[in-house]
Image: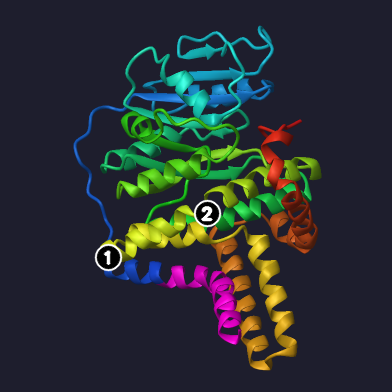
Amino acid sequence: MMVVWIIIQVLIGFHLVFPLLLYGFYLLRKAVGSGSVAAVPTEPADYAVIITAYEQTHQLPAAIQSILDQHEQNFIVYVVLDNCKPGSFDYSHEKVVLLWPEQVLAGNVRSHFYAINRFVRPHNRLTIIDSDNLADPAYLAELNVFFDRGYEAVQGVRDPKNLNTTLACLDAARDIYYHFYDGRLLYGAGSSATLAGSGMAFTTRLYQDCLAGFDMQGAGFDKVLQNRILRMNKRIAFADRAVVYDEKTTQAGQLVNQRSRWINTWFSFFYFGFGLVGQGLFRLRMNQLLFGLVLLRPPLFIFLLLSIVCMLANVFVSATAVIIWLAGFVCFVGGFLLSLAHGKTDRRIFRALLHIPKFIWLQVTALLFAARANQRSVATKHD
């Protein structure tokens, strides 16, 4: 039993120190200068920008305009108005195509392929934007940098569009953490950036190869997509200058519904990590190995609470183990602050960190609703 207890603790505690281990490996790889990719001849960029809207349309004009203002101008915008009242939205522009599904799709993949099947021309690249996003004017041009190096999948950065409440600031802090470790460092260490649901781009052929014929309702398509890309031994590049501004949750109800879907997604698809770790070890591929380890990591609040439970349990078992757990927490806090320091974080976010216990409690509440998350809500509703 003691051996089993030690193994359980190692599996949980590993996630406290993994960020700093990844940072060290990233610095080592950067020092030896490996991982650079030279530009390769490619066909001119022709983007399909797919914007998905579910029920709400009031933020669409700003999202569309942010695409029309791009430095790269070879694109068509496809707006999929799923479950939106007919005639509730209008936008007249030669580069904007409004699509009204005959039936409720209630799924990202369904919406994307609804647009793909109605392309006005055969675009060689597509990028996915949420209706509450705003794209930086250089967004498409920065994606071109990585496509021109031969990558077929690119994840950009989702910076906060609003920091008007404490919850929005804490939501932004979480994004900064994940962008740093699951984006910049993971990609820089020789693996792939994790997909974030929007602000991502692919060659049209790759997206179709991965998801054609795949149907799912609710959240999680990005988990399936990234797994299939990694299974092909392709890398997902991280474009830290391809920025979309994402609306952060401002109310407790929003956060609970959103996190319920995300938690449900992790429980549904974390097992992908076992396959990628096995493939990485068997074939000696750093891309799959590191990425698989990240997929096996529970949401932050879950492994933090489990770590606290383990540390408290050791009060009655081993003082040495308690000290080791405390050291693990120090490593995690240091790694978290490191990500904020690298992210040029707004002072409001630092002040909001005092409210982390409330943030964790709301996510515990979300965990209770995770089993029926997709029945509770399909998309986050913003005011």
The chief SS type of the magenta part is helix
Q: Quadrant of residue 32?
A: bottom left
Q: Which residue is mark 1?
A: 33
Range of magenta residues: 1-24
20 magenta-colored: yes
Residue 200 visible, this orientation = yes
Quarter of the N terminus within the rendering: bottom right
Q: Which residue is mark 2?
A: 270
The residue shown at (46%, 38%) is: 200
258 magenta-colored: no
Residue 317 rendering spot, x and y as whole percentages: 70, 90
Q: Quadrant of residue 133?
A: top right
What kind of residue is marked 2? Phe
The residue shown at (33%, 59%) is: 279
Local packing at callout 2 (Cα closer than 10 Å; few below 14, some 14-19, many 20+) is some
Earlier sequence position, callout 2 versus callout 1: 1
What kind of residue is marked 1? Gly
Q: Which mark is residue 106?
A: none
Local packing at callout 1 (Cα closer than 10 Å; few below 14, some 14-19, many 20+) is few
**Looking at the image, is 198 positioned above or below residue 46?**
below
Q: Closer to the observer: label 2 or label 1?
A: 2
